[in-house]
């Protein structure tokens, strides 16, 4: 490729569906940088070009220690490019993948620093819309930086057309349903990241897109206390509040998250620093893990989490949604919103409707979530290994359900299916 004045490109790091990332040397400032280039074929596509230039415009007004900086934007012939700060170190995704559950004090520190970056984005009237572990960059010096504003939305831009975008496993319920996206939507994504740091597992990810979207809208994730018994009640409550299905039940703003994190740090005597994060990144196996006291009585002002009923996501609609997902995790699901609105307008009830319609009033549905996994048998018939592709449609009546696991044994139960309703069951095979 051609040389960009002032920079020497020496490595291609990532070639995505929308752009290509190169590693380069900045001669003027004697530093390594990243160059994000929109190839000519994509540069000609209006949607890619518009989003790329929007990212450049938004990034130009964002400057914060917890945000990955954009140093320059320009054109290489007809191809737009951005010069990005190079953060030498792993992404949060890579760190979790390597070590699974992070030490609690490291979780606190990364979460608080990430919340500062989110607060800076929101203060500039921008919604990030793609907060996930892959977009959290950690330096070997212990810095925490939120990056990748490729899907960001400028709330000051009144000419922007409405779109549904994000990475499915980290999208908020309102994003999935095509409803208004606000700062609270970013906080839900932040909660999903915190959950993953604490447990080592994604909160909602599943094998298929429809199943993932269904879990985001309808399911609570596996309880943190089950996957991380040493997590304190207050930390669990904070994560649950961030993951509330109803946006109004979450923290009001990122600054409220920072204040609460500071309160918990004082409460448990935490003084984690960038140096400690750097030590953990360098040698996770040698890091001295701490145990937080769990028997401290929570103050009256402790977080209260609320569970609210939310509209269930139609599996038929979710199947349609899966066809609309394209490039870089961007999901356009206008048809989902229309179906939900039509359902509400018609006064329809019931939780989940399978893609193949049943005789009205004759069938119900069984929605199973099994930890860690199991083979499902109902009245002797095998339905497969969990996670299943969707709820099981059954005629109303009583059934013997058997969940089998080669190491954890079998769990048997009697369940009653009611016509027109969905029976949801979360089964933990690790418990007696």
Image (cartoon, rainbow, N blue to C red):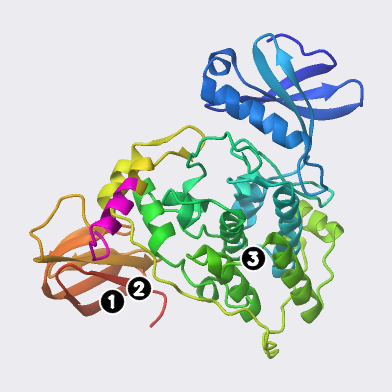
Q: Residue at x 53, y 59 (%)?
A: 201
Mark 1 or mark 3, earlier in chain: 3
Q: Would residue 285 appear left or right of 238 to someone viewing this image?
A: right
| Relative depth, front residue between 378 and 176 | 176
Say which residue label 1 marks: 411
Say which residue label 3 marks: 252
Q: Residue at x 64, y 57 (%)?
A: 99
Residue 13 lies in what quarter of the image? top right
The magenta span reads 338-352
Cβ–Cβ under 8 Å for marks 3 and 2: no
| Relative depth, front residue between 379 and 422 | 422
- Residue 55, above or below 387: above
How far apart in space, not on screen, are marks 3 and 2 (Cα)?
Answer: 33 Å
Residue 12 in the image: x percent, y percent? 67, 23
Tell whether position 384 is magenta.
no
Cβ–Cβ under 8 Å for marks 1 and 2: yes
Residue 31 lies in what quarter of the image? top right
Does any portion of residue 229 appear in the rendered image? Answer: yes
Mark 1 or mark 2, earlier in chain: 1
Tell whether position 342 is magenta.
yes
Mark 1: secondary structure: strand
Viewer-side label of 3, 2 = 3
Say which residue label 2 marks: 427
Q: Would residue 140 appear left or right of 55 to someone viewing this image?
A: right
Q: Would residue 403 appear left or right of 268 to someone viewing this image?
A: left
The quadrant the N terminus occupies is top right
- Residue 224, above or below 388: below
| Relative depth, front residue between 108 and 346 | 346
Residue 336 in the image: x percent, y percent? 34, 47
Residue 388 in the image: x percent, y percent? 29, 56
């Amino acid at each position: 490729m051609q040389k960009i004045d002032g920079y020497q490109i020496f490595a291609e790091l990532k070639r995505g569906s929308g752009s290509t990332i190169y590693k380069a040397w900045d001669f003027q400032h004697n530093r390594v940088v990243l160059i994000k280039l929109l190839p000519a074929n994509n540069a000609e596509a209006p949607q890619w070009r518009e989003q790329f230039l929007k990212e450049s415009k938004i990034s130009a007004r964002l400057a914060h220690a917890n945000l990955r900086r954009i140093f320059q934007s320009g054109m290489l012939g007809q191809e737009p490019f951005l010069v990005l700060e190079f953060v030498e170190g792993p992404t949060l995704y890579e760190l979790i993948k390597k070590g699974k559950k992070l030490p609690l004090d490291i979780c606190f520190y990364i979460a608080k620093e990430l919340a500062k970056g989110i607060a800076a984005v929101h203060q500039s009237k921008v919604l990030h819309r793609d907060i996930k572990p892959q977009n959290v960059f950690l330096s070997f010096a212990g810095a925490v930086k939120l990056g990748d504003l490729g899907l960001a939305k400028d709330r000051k831009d009144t000419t922007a057309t409405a779109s549904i975008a994000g990475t499915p496993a980290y999208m908020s319920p309102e994003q999935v349903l095509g409803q208004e996206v606000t700062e609270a939507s970013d906080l839900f994504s932040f909660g999903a990241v915190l959950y993953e740091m604490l447990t080592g597992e994604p909160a909602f990810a599943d094998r298929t897109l429809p199943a993932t979207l269904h879990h985001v809208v309808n399911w609570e994730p596996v309880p943190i206390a089950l996957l991380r018994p040493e997590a304190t009640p207050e930390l669990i409550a904070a994560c649950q509040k961030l993951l509330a299905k109803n946006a109004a039940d979450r923290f009001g703003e990122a600054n409220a998250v920072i204040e609460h994190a500071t309160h918990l740090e004082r409460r448990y005597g935490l003084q984690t620093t960038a140096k400690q994060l750097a030590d953990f990144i360098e040698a996770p196996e040698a890091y001295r893990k701490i145990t937080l006291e769990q028997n401290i009585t929570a103050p009256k002002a402790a977080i209260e989490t609320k569970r609210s009923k939310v509209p269930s996501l139609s599996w038929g609609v979710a199947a349609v949604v899966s066809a609309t997902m394209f490039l870089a995790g961007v999901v356009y699901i206008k048809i989902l919103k229309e179906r939900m609105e039509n359902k509400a307008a018609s006064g329809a009830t019931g939780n989940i409707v399978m893609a193949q319609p049943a005789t009205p009033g004759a069938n119900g549905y069984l929605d199973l979530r099994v930890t860690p996994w199991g083979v499902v048998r109902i009245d002797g018939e095998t339905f497969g290994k969990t996670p299943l592709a969707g709820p099981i449609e059954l005629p109303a009546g009583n059934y013997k359900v058997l969940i089998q696991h080669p190491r954890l044994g079998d769990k048997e139960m009697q369940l009653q299916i009611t016509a027109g309703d969905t029976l949801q069951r979360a089964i933990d095979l690790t418990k007696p």
